[in-house]
Structure formats: structure tokens, C-alpha cells
Image (spheres, rainbow, N blue to C red):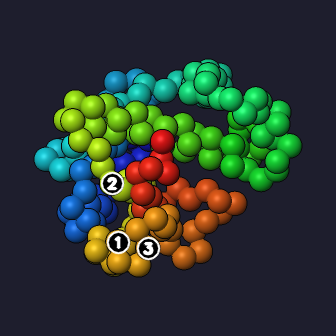
Amino acid sequence: PVLRAPDAATLEAARSAAHMLGADVFAVFTCRGRVELSSALTGWVTRYTLFEDGAGLAGLRAEFAAANKDNRSNMSTATYAAIGGNFLGPLVGHDGRNAFLLRDLWRCQQLVKQHEISSSLQYRYLAFSRIDIHWLAPPPPLKLFLQANPDAVWLPDGQDWDGVNDRFAFVPRRWVG
């Protein structure tokens, strides 16, 4: 959410981490009503979108249906709820906000796809990070990821809550879709 934007030092650490990875930065921000983005984001965010989001759970359900219209698995939200865990949070009647996180990741993926089409390129890797993450150290250099295992999905140790991570991940493009 825009109103919970991190302080300037945290944003600078995020900018530095993106620079170290040689990354283009795509961002999704949600808000209620019209707001202005922080000037600390200008100059290093490649593309962003701002969603005025006041529809809550009803809006989340509508976006889930739209994003899954071609879902050939026939899995409904009731089927997902039976799996257990909070990976879809309020979408299936559980605590947590993971469904909102997944929605925003999907929104960001759409930004990346649009950029890939408009610039006639496709990224080899995608990474995501919360903009408010507190970097205690810079991320490992890109060549370390590539040398270790170019097909691996990389998560910080201990950050794989029920298979969902909302802090940082480094993913080969082919696994993103």
C-alpha cells in the first residue's frame, strides 16, 4: 500500500539492491483514493502501476476469477480451501493477506509482460522483493545465482512459509509463465 511506503533509507537500499543485480524494477502500488508517489521512486523504477483499491474481498474474488478464466485444472476456491494453509488467505476464508500478495504479484507480472512485448525482449530471470524489505546486506551477485544452478528458484533461508514468500525470490523466467 502506498500509505505504508518505507522511509528514504529503506528505498535507497532497495534501489541499491536492484542496481547490484542489474535489474529493471516494476512496481505495483495500491491505495484508496488518489495519491502521489514518493519522489524517492523516480529515476529507478522502470514501470509501475497504481491501483485504487477499495473493493476489498469482492474485488479480490473478481480479479481471481479474471486471472483464472483459462484454468484447466477445474480447481475452485473451495478446492483450494480444502488444501489447508493460508496461502490464499481471505479468498478461501482463512486469516492472512497472502491472496492480496498473489494478486499484486500477478499484476506486476502483467507489467513485466507488457514491457517485454513493447521492448521486444524477454527477461531470463525475474526477481521480486517487497519494496519495504530491510536489506541487511546486498543480494548476492547475479553471476553467483547463475553459477550455482541456473534453473533454481532462490529464496532467502527460512523464508518459505507454506511455499509462499512475500519478501524476495529469484526465479528463472520460464517458471513464471
The label shown at residue 138 is: none
Q: Residue at x 82, y 50 (%)?
A: 84
Which quadrant holds residue 130? bottom left
Residues under labels 1 and 3: Cα distance? 6 Å
**Type of residue at label 2?**
Arg
Q: Is residue 3 above or below residue 133?
A: above
- Around disc 3, counting alpha carbons within 10 Å, would you say few (fewer than 14), some (14 to 19), or many (20 or more)? few
**Residue position marked by numbered label 3 in the rendering:** 149
Q: Residue at x 65, y 29 (%)?
A: 71
**Type of residue at label 3?**
Asn
Q: Residue at x 29, y 70 (%)?
A: 142
**Residue position marked by numbered label 1 in the rendering:** 146
Frontmost residue, 7 versus 119 = 119
Name the side, left or right, on which 50 lies relative to 96.
Answer: left
Q: Position of residue 139 (x, y in %)?
A: 34, 73
Image quarter (top left, top right, bottom left or bottom right) of the N terminus: top left
Label 2 residue SS: loop
**Type of residue at label 1?**
Leu
